[in-house]
Amino acid sequence: MTESFCKMPRPLMAATQWVSLTTGEHLALSGQDKILWAWMKDRYDFFTSQHKNWFDNQDDIAKYTGCSVSTVKRFIQLLNKHGYLKKTQRRVHGFAYSNSYTIVQDLVLASVEKVTPLPLPLVQEERTPDYAPIIFPVALTHAEPVAVSPEPVRLAAREQAGWDDEPQWNIRSSG
């Protein structure tokens, strides 16, 4: 099975805003917007590398990104309004329309404070616990089973009452 991956650049992951190309204002960038942009950019790059137009419909974009169709529509409208995306409609089968998308420019992220990357863990170093492990003595971990005999008072009471239909229990050890 071959898997394909959609890469999300680290600056996009760290960004909280993007810049409008038409107004210059800073717009909020949610986690869903980041996923949508990364997926849409990946699909656009895939189709343009094959010299084709990108014709994914909004239902498919929503299905593959885990977002709602209304979120996809809202984000596409924002990208179109702020100069990042051109949407072209063409008539299909006489009465239906299909949208073709062209990404004009990569998303310009608003300047955010520098996020220092976390250091990668050292693979060679063994982790040691911050506490002393509990070591159980051998006598507690390998104890022999103990058989307890029934109470003699109850047996005498049963014999006097004539209860001899009770099963006799044999105690065996497993192990």
Image (cartoon, rainbow, N blue to C red):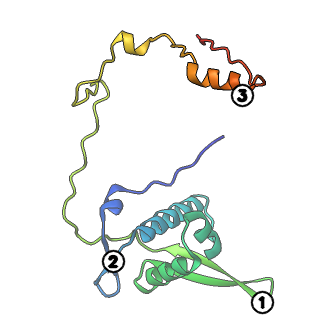
Q: Residue at x 69, y 24 (%)?
A: 160
Q: Is residue 57 visible?
A: no
Q: First in sequence, mark 1 or 3: give its number.
A: 1
* Amino acid type at mark 3: Ala
Question: Viewer-nearest of labels 1 and 3?
Answer: 3
Left or right: residue 123 versus residue 113 is: right
- Outermost residue to the front: 160
Q: First in sequence, mark 2 or 3: give its number.
A: 2
* Amino acid type at mark 2: Ala
Q: Is residue 93 visible?
A: yes
- Residue at numbered disc 2: 28
Residue 14, percent from left and from top: 30, 61
Figure quadrant of the C terminus: top right
Q: Height in image: 139 above or below 79?
A: above
Near-viewer residue (162 or 133): 162
Residue 161, percent from left and from top: 71, 28
Question: Gap in Å between the C-alphas at discs 1 and 3?
Answer: 95 Å
* Amino acid type at mark 1: Phe
Residue 4, percent from left and from top: 57, 49
Q: Secondary structure at mark 3?
A: helix
Near-viewer residue (112 or 80): 112
Q: Secondary structure at mark 2?
A: strand
- Residue at numbered disc 3: 161
Determine whether label 1 and label 3 are within 8 Å by CB.
no
Determine whether label 2 and label 3 are within 8 Å by CB.
no
Q: Secondary structure at mark 1?
A: loop
Q: Height in image: 112 above or below 123?
A: below
Q: Residue at x 68, y 25 (%)?
A: 158
